[in-house]
Image: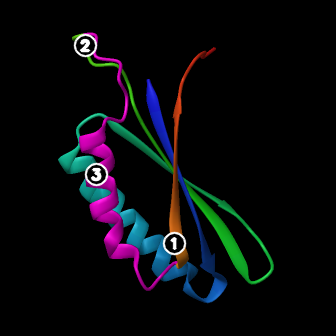
Amino acid sequence: MRELFVWYRVDDRCADAARAAVAAMQRALASSCPGLRMRLLVRQGAGVQTWMESYARAPSPHGDSRGVDAETEAAIAAAALSLEGVIDGERHVEAFDVVASL
């Protein structure tokens, strides 16, 4: 199963606007990508925060356990265009395959 982790920086002065933008983006993704699980994590810094979004999909009842596929990743990237102007720099996308879970 494939999961995505996306990190970027947010200036403290833009944090409220960025949080609202990410929440709106993830609500829209929840509507268009059934079964997609999303989280937002924040690490505080001195004037700049590091944010990480995570995306995962549980196996379907039909046994599909691919996780986040290319189509879903493209939908996430397209939705993230709405974050321009509230994040500091670019988004860095990392994909990992789950090999074990407890």
Q: Which residue is mark 2?
A: 61
Q: Which residue is mark 1?
A: 90
Residue at x 51% of width, y 78% of height: 87
Q: Position of residue 6 (x, y in %)?
A: 52, 54
Q: CA distance from mark 1 to mark 2?
A: 36 Å
Kindly indicate the quadrant of the structure image that contains residue 34: top left
Tell me the tag on residue 98: none
Residue at x 29% of width, y 34% of height: 35
Residue at x 34% of width, y 59% of height: 77
In primary-sequence order, the first of circles 3 and 2 is: 2
Q: Position of residue 65 (x, y in %)?
A: 35, 18
Decide: few, some or many residues near mark 1? Use Cα within 10 Å; few <14, some 14-19, many ≥20: few
Q: Is residue 7 left or right of residue 32?
A: right
Decide: few, some or many residues near mark 3? Use Cα within 10 Å; few <14, some 14-19, many ≥20: few
Kindly indicate the quadrant of the structure image that contains residue 28: bottom left
Please report the bounds of the magenta region as a residue range: 63-87
* Magenta span contains residue 97: no
* Magenta span contains residue 64: yes
- The correct choice, above or below, for 63 with respect to 27 in the image is above
Tell me the tag on residue 74: 3
Residue type, mark 2 in image: Pro
Judged from this view, the residue extending furthest toward the bottom is 13
